[in-house]
Image: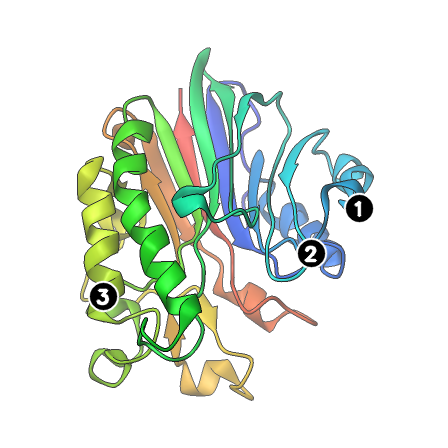
Amino acid sequence: MAASDSSADRLVVATWNINSIRSRLPLVERFVAAYAPDVLLLQETRCPDAQFPTSGLDKLGYPHVVVNGRKGHHGVAIAAKRPITDVMRENLADIDEGRHIAGAVEVGGRKVVLHSLYIPSGGDEPDPAVNPKFAAKLAYLEAFAPWSRTAAAVPSLVGGDFNVAPLPEDVWSHKQLLKVISHTPEETERLDAAQNAGSWVDVVRRDLPPPEKVFTWWSYRNRDHTVSNRGRRLDHMWASPSLADRVSGIRVVPEARSWEKPSDHVPVLVTISG
């Protein structure tokens, strides 16, 4: 497996819902040893800011860390080999749960804004009238559209766990999941609106287009996910129009789902050129 080129004119960025950074720091170590990304966009860190294992990431070669942490199933972070500037933390739909952090990193002497985003999962019942979690998710997705229009105005990459599998080929069964949260029309239509608002390029699907199936998440309920392969593509990388042509090297790492005590999500990598 090839390591990334650490020269200043290339930046390898990985997004990963790590499902507890403190519990799975050994998995991060294994991942960076194999793929050597320059930047990690992490979600579901499950860690208040003061308890984030900054020193552990420093030992792995990431001395620059910014966090927006919470207890429970929340929290995001960016860890980088290069300095991170212009840090932002935003609460879409006034949901203050540590779901966004952004910062600028230089590539080839030019700044690129990197966003780590964690959209709410929405619970189990796809009816906002009876499920407040689903109502909150839809509100977040609605707020995502005007936010994305502004964010796309500069060279930017949004990576993260969007908790939405938008395309029929992003799920193991389009028909069976139409009424399952993450693939309902209410969610996919709102995510499409957010993408279109900023003319974002879904670089994973640009380079791995349908009809190819692409999954980044498999439920823990599957005893052996490689047999049933009932996955979903919940983790995304979107590039702004001014950056998209500089993004290449798209790679999903499904083998990470088979590592010991894994996250239910796997990393996605892209390379940004200067």
State which tag comes first along the sequence, 3 or 1: 1
Characterize the local packing of mark 2: few (<14), some (14-19) or many (20 or more) Cα atoms within 10 angstroms: some
The residue nearer to you, when weighing 65 against 33, is 65
**Relative image position of residue 156 (x, y in whole percent):** 37, 29
Mark 1 sits on what residue?
A: 51
For residue 236, say whether it is visible: yes
Q: Which mark is residue 186?
A: 3
Q: Amino acid at mark 1?
A: Gln
**Relative image position of residue 127 (x, y in whole percent):** 30, 76
**Up/down of 187 relative to 12, above or below:** below
**Up/down of 180 relative to 268, above or below:** below
Q: Quadrant of the C terminus?
A: top left
The residue nearer to you, when weighing 241 against 109, is 241
Residue at left offset 59%, top offset 23%: 84
**CB atoms of marks 1 and 2 within 8 Å:** no
Residue at left offset 46%, top offset 46%: 117
Residue at left offset 50%, top offset 47%: 15
Q: Amino acid at mark 3?
A: Glu
Mark 2 sits on what residue?
A: 71
The residue nearer to you, when weighing 240 against 134, is 134
Q: What colouring style does the render use?
A: rainbow
